[in-house]
Image: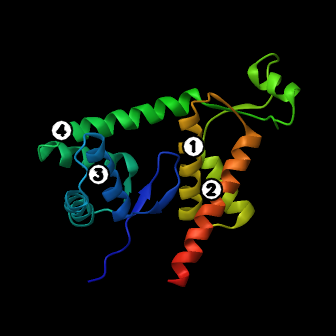
Amino acid sequence: MLQTQLKVIKADGSIEEYLHTKVMGSINNALGETGQANIDIAEQFAEVVTFFLYNQYNRRTVTSGDIFSMIKVVLAATDYEDAAVALSEHHFERKLKRSRTEVVSVDIQDLTDAELLAGAEEPAGRSRWDKSRIVDDLITRYNLCRQTARTIAAMVEERVFNMGMTLVPSSLIKQLVLGEAASVLRAQRQLQTV
């Protein structure tokens, strides 16, 4: 019997297909935070989560929060409590960074623009960081599939957070999006030729 592809309702309300490999990556990253990265264990735990979702949950959709909770339960129930804690800490750190980061409609070209960003003047067009805006823009303006757009947006978010900036000029985001899009599209082409 062929099962229907499970859909995940993301925190921003968007819907995407459930990816077993994404769950596996999250588990392995959590294990890695505690010095216990092991792709075989991550694969086994992801199988448990996937099995439960498809065979026990008995719905066609699941929230990303439910998946997050299931991963934590699997880790905690299998003597990997430290990894479950690390996963929670990473999740809350991410939320905190998202709440503290703002995008400013500034195109940094010279020192005057930099002064505007630095707060010498109150910048117009401030908005809270929201990577789903990048996703939507890539889908509507460039006709990318949602999964590719989410991958690019996640890569941009990682770069922005690693910079430690709380006020990010929109011109920088545009450059990061273009750079990461080029990397992802190049990788996709390479995979198609293999």
Q: Picture quarter containing residue 118?
A: top right
Question: Viewer-nearest of labels 2 and 4?
Answer: 2
Q: For residue 39, which numbered disc appears in the image?
A: none
- Residue 84 as seen in the image, left or right of residue 110: left
Q: The residue tagged with tag 1: helix, strand or loop?
A: helix
Question: Viewer-nearest of labels 1 and 3?
Answer: 1
Residue 93 in the image: state x and y as whole percent: 43, 31
Q: Is residue 145 visible?
A: no
Q: CA distance from mark 3 to mark 2?
A: 24 Å
Q: Foreground residue, 36 or 45? A: 36
Q: Earlier in the sequence, mark 3 or mark 4?
A: 3
Q: Residues at badges 2 and 1 in contact (C-beta under 8 Å)?
A: yes
Residue 48 in the image: state x and y as whole percent: 20, 60
Q: Foreground residue, 95 or 64? A: 95
Q: Residues at badges 1 and 3 in contact (C-beta under 8 Å)?
A: no
Q: Residues within 10 Å of mark 2 (few under 14, many from 20)?
A: some
In the rendered image, the vertical position of residue 127 relative to residue 83, given as above or below:
above
Q: How is the image coloured?
A: rainbow
- For the N terminus, which image quadrant? bottom left
Q: CA distance from mark 1 to mark 3?
A: 21 Å
